[in-house]
Image: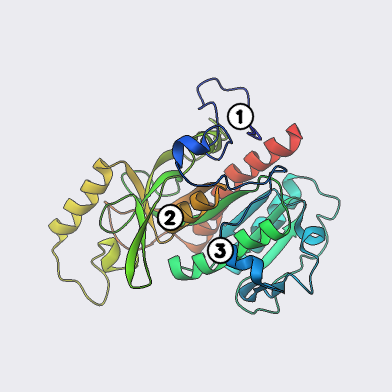
Amino acid sequence: MECDCDYVTTNNEDLPAHYDNCRVMWPQMNPGKPFPKNSDGSIKLPNKHLQELDVDILYHLGLDTHNHDLPAMFGDVKFVCMGGTKHRMREFAQYISEVLNLPNKGEKLVNLTKHSQRYAMYKVGPVLSVSHGIGIPSMTTLLQEMIKLVSYAKAKDPIFFRVGTCGGLNIPAGSVVVSSFGLNGNLEKTYDVPVLGKTRRFPAILDTRVCQEVHSMASHSDNFGTYIGGTMAADDFYRGQARLDGPFCDYSESDKMSFLKTLTNLGVRNIEMEATAFSAFTREAGIRASIVCVTFLNRLQGDQVTPSKTMLTEWQKRPMIIVGRYIAKYCEKK
């Protein structure tokens, strides 16, 4: 069995030898599960029921397999970059077009999902920039249709990113965190979802090599720090994140601080609302993925986001810078 890693960086001997979805590694890490890729590197969807459909309607994207030539539209996609708001992901698409110096970088971006009126998706070269809303339900709706989209498009070895914002733990506001794992509200590295009346648990672990590769894109000349660490994904913005400023609060400040310190002792660097599901579903699909977020505050020092809008807008560009360097590195190599 030969390695089929499509390496992005090759000049660091300290990195793991393979990606988790390598043909060599998959049987060891996923015993009994079929290999999730076709011979050409495209994603092989495990749901056999899809083969019975005459047409698959990707409802929330406003696309389908009959009226749209998905391989022609998206077959060259290498990177799927997802983030919360439509505005941010439009801005990210514009930024990437400039980073890659694409011929059409000055042209008006077209929202490819405008007919769905739910999300926004822009394509610039080999990059799809897509909004996913806030929280796991909204994000996973988009994520699962994006997994089907890249499979139907026969995109080769796609890499998924979540580019977002978060609350930091014991690191300065404005720092960037590259997630190594997701942690749920019960402090477990799983995404738990009820299926047919029973709770299913999916490992929320991200590819170690990808994580370290992305982190290596940080530069000493950056005016911000970039950290690797775990990410807690809360199901609620207030009590679920141990805040004291929500409409309901039935715990003390000392309870809050004890919980946040427990998180830091577990290696958690930040808190957001999508990491466990994003980690679990990309891993189940055999897709390399990374989460790169900027912290808007240090939760050990408070609960409210107090920096100015101008500063927050500048900080939101920091994950884009790190991910942009990674994408540029791949494109330069190719």
Give left or right: position of 77 versus 200.
right
Front: mark 2 or 1: 1
Marks 2 and 3 sit apart, C-alpha to C-alpha, by 14 Å
Q: Which residue is mark 3?
A: 144
Mark 3 element type: helix
Q: Are marks 1 and 3 in contact (CB under 8 Å)?
A: no
Q: What's under tag 3, amino acid-wise?
A: Gln
> What residue appears at the point 52 percent right and 34 percent down from the top-left corner?
25
Give left or right: position of 294 versus 58.
left
Q: Nearer the viewer, residue 282 or 8?
A: 282
Percent position of residue 288, x then y = 56, 45
Front: mark 1 or 3: 1
Give left or right: position of 76 versus 151.
right
How has the structure been colored for display?
rainbow
Q: Nearer the viewer, residue 202 or 12?
A: 202
Label number found at residue 275:
2
Q: Which residue is mark 1?
A: 1
Q: Are marks 2 and 1 in contact (CB under 8 Å)?
A: no
> What residue appears at the point 35 percent right and 66 percent down from the top-left corner?
235
Q: Quadrant of residue 304?
A: bottom left
Q: What's under tag 1, amino acid-wise?
A: Met
Front: mark 2 or 3: 3
Percent position of residue 75, x then y = 77, 54
Marks 2 and 1 sit apart, C-alpha to C-alpha, by 32 Å
Comes first in the chain, label 2 or label 1: 1
Mark 2 element type: helix
